[in-house]
Amino acid sequence: MSDALGGRTFITTRIDKLVNWARKNSLWPMPFGTACCAIELMSTLASRNDLSRFGAEAIRFTPRQCDLMIVAGRVAIKELPILKRIWDQMPEPKWCISMGACASSGGIFDTYTLVQGIDRFIPVDVYIPGCPPRPEAVIDAVIKIQKVVENDTWRNYKKELLEQRRQEKIFKGPMLPWQPK
């Protein structure tokens, strides 16, 4: 405090830091649960683990209100267009958690019917290992996402990253009819 200001206290900050602080403490997850990982995600929201302590308990089932997608479980090729449409409908900025071995790499299901890692189609920020991962791992991933959100800048680096991946043809596997060329 200073006498030159008449004894008033004030705080200075950058607007992006303030906005990122608000985003970090009010994540709205969009669950895309298809298997046993979805059950573990549900138990993370229960009173024993209480994801609400971290500001991420407002689960919404409409993509236009969410900023964090949690893909929990195996994703079939037929479900991929739905996953991609939900991801595209989410407003920017948005983040993604790949929960479990199946969503991250296909897990033990090395078949033509399942996607061998969702990172080939949408950008993933945090991977959670395990089959299925424990609720503590989900909470740790949310904390990591909060650190990513806290250090985020105004420019949209994910679109740039996705465009770079498309240009470098990092997307592996067969070109699907709905996959951008």
Image: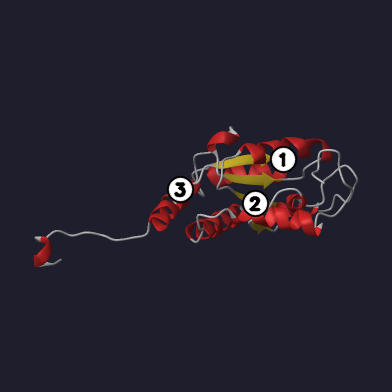
- Residue in the picture at 55% in, 54% down: 142
User: Which of labels 3 and 1 is toward the front?
Assistant: 1
Query: Which amino acid type corresponds to the residue marked 1 in the rendered image?
Result: Lys
- Residue in the picture at 88% in, 42% down: 113
Contact, CB < 8 Å: mark 1 with mark 2? no
User: Which of labels 1 and 2 is toward the front?
Assistant: 2
Which residue lies under the disc numbered 1? 84
User: Which of labels 2 and 3 is toward the front?
Assistant: 2
In the image, which disc is placed on residue 94? none
In the image, which disc is placed on residue 55? 3
Query: Label 2, label 3: how many angstroms apart (C-alpha)?
Result: 26 Å
Which residue lies under the disc numbered 2? 159
Is 53 on the left or on the right of 126, as rendered? left
- Residue in the picture at 73% in, 45% down: 73
Q: Quadrant of residue 127?
A: bottom right
Seen from this angle, which residue lies furthest top? 62
Q: Quarter holding the N terminus?
A: bottom left
Question: Residue 136: image x %, image y %?
Answer: 57, 56
Contact, CB < 8 Å: mark 2 with mark 3? no
Label 3 secondary element = loop
Query: Which amino acid type corresponds to the residue marked 3 in the rendered image?
Result: Gly
Q: Is residue 40 visible?
A: no
Query: Which amino acid type corresponds to the residue marked 2 in the rendered image?
Result: Lys
Label 1 secondary element = helix
Query: Label 1, label 2: how many angstroms apart (C-alpha)?
Result: 14 Å
Is 57 on the left or on the right of 180, as rendered? left
Query: Label 3, label 1: how many angstroms apart (C-alpha)?
Result: 26 Å
